[in-house]
Structures are given as structure tokens and as C-alpha cells.
Image (cartoon, rainbow, N blue to C red):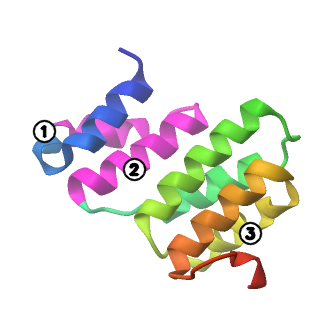
């Protein structure tokens, strides 16, 4: 089982996965950015602990990449997790907004996440 699949499974288990918190926390320092964002989600769902600093770092990491399908999948995943967690710190929200420079699906994912986070309805581009 891959680390990503394991983290998604632990996140789905929620509080029942408390015994795995040391392993989840260890994944927060992974060299793989996607593993870190999935660990943030698992940590939040299992313990309620937020790590907006890692979300901000993750989103800033992607802004240097060019638009392609691979980037789209990772940014969309970050936006999904971000939207689930709710209101982040201002730095993480600013990092999310910087990703609006990407076209198409990434821009839509960013706007959808921001709308969920801020409790907005409709197109979040008016911010």
C-alpha cells in the first residue's frame, strides 16, 4: 500500500486512527509534497490538529511550476484538502490566491476552495 493510500485511509477512519498519529506526524516531514498535504488532512481528521504552515508551503511550492496535468492533479488535491479544513491563516490563503495565475481547471479548483473556505457562494473571483 502506498503512503498516499494509507494516509487517505487513516483520514477516512478519523478518530479511530488515533494510534497512527506518530506515523502521520512523521509524514509531515516527507520529501514528497503530496505526502505532506495528505498527512495534514489525516492529522486534522484524526486529531483535529491543523498545520496551515504546511499547506502554505505546499501551495507556494506549486506556484513555480508550469501548468500541466501533473500539476493540476496536485493543486486540485491541495485545494480539496484546503477547502475541507476551512479558514486558514492569512499566509496560506494568500498562497492559494497566487495560484489563480494558472488557467482552466486549476483556477476553478482554487476559486472553489477559496469559496468553501470563506463561505462564499458562486464565483469566488470577485474577492
Which residue lies under the disc numbered 2?
41
Q: Earlier in the sequence, mark 2 or mark 3?
A: 2
Q: Residue at x 50, y 63 (%)?
A: 83
* Residues at marks 1 and 3, CA–CA distance in whole angstroms: 35 Å
Q: Secondary structure at mark 1?
A: helix
Q: Is residue 31 magenta?
A: yes
Q: Residue at x 63, y 77 (%)?
A: 122
- Taking depth in this image into account, of 39 and 72 the one nearest to the observer is 72
Which residue lies under the disc numbered 1?
19
Residue 85 percent across, percent down from the top left: 42, 64
Residue 40 percent across, percent down from the top left: 42, 50
Residue 120 in view of the camera: yes
Q: Main secondary structure of the magenta part?
A: helix
Q: Residue at x 63, y 55 (%)?
A: 57
Q: Give the magenta range.
A: 20-47
The part of the image, by quadrant, that contains residue 31 is: top right
Q: Earlier in the sequence, mark 1 or mark 3?
A: 1
Which residue lies under the disc numbered 3?
97
Amino acid at each position: 500500500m502506498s503512503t498516499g493510500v494509507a494516509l487517505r485511509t487513516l483520514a477516512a477512519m478519523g478518530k479511530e486512527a488515533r494510534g497512527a498519529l506518530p506515523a502521520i506526524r512523521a509524514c509531515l516531514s516527507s520529501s514528497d509534497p503530496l505526502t505532506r498535504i495528505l498527512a495534514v488532512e489525516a492529522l486534522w481528521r484524526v486529531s483535529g490538529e491543523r498545520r496551515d504552515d504546511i499547506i502554505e508551503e505546499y501551495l507556494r511550492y506549486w506556484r513555480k511550476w508550469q501548468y500541466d496535468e501533473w500539476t493540476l492533479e496536485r493543486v486540485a488535491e491541495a485545494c480539496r484538502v484546503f477547502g475541507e479544513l476551512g479558514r486558514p491563516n492569512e499566509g496560506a490563503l494568500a498562497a492559494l490566491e497566487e495560484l489563480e495565475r494558472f488557467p482552466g481547471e486549476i483556477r476553478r479548483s482554487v476559486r472553489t476552495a477559496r469559496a468553501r473556505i470563506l463561505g462564499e457562494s458562486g464565483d469566488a473571483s470577485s474577492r
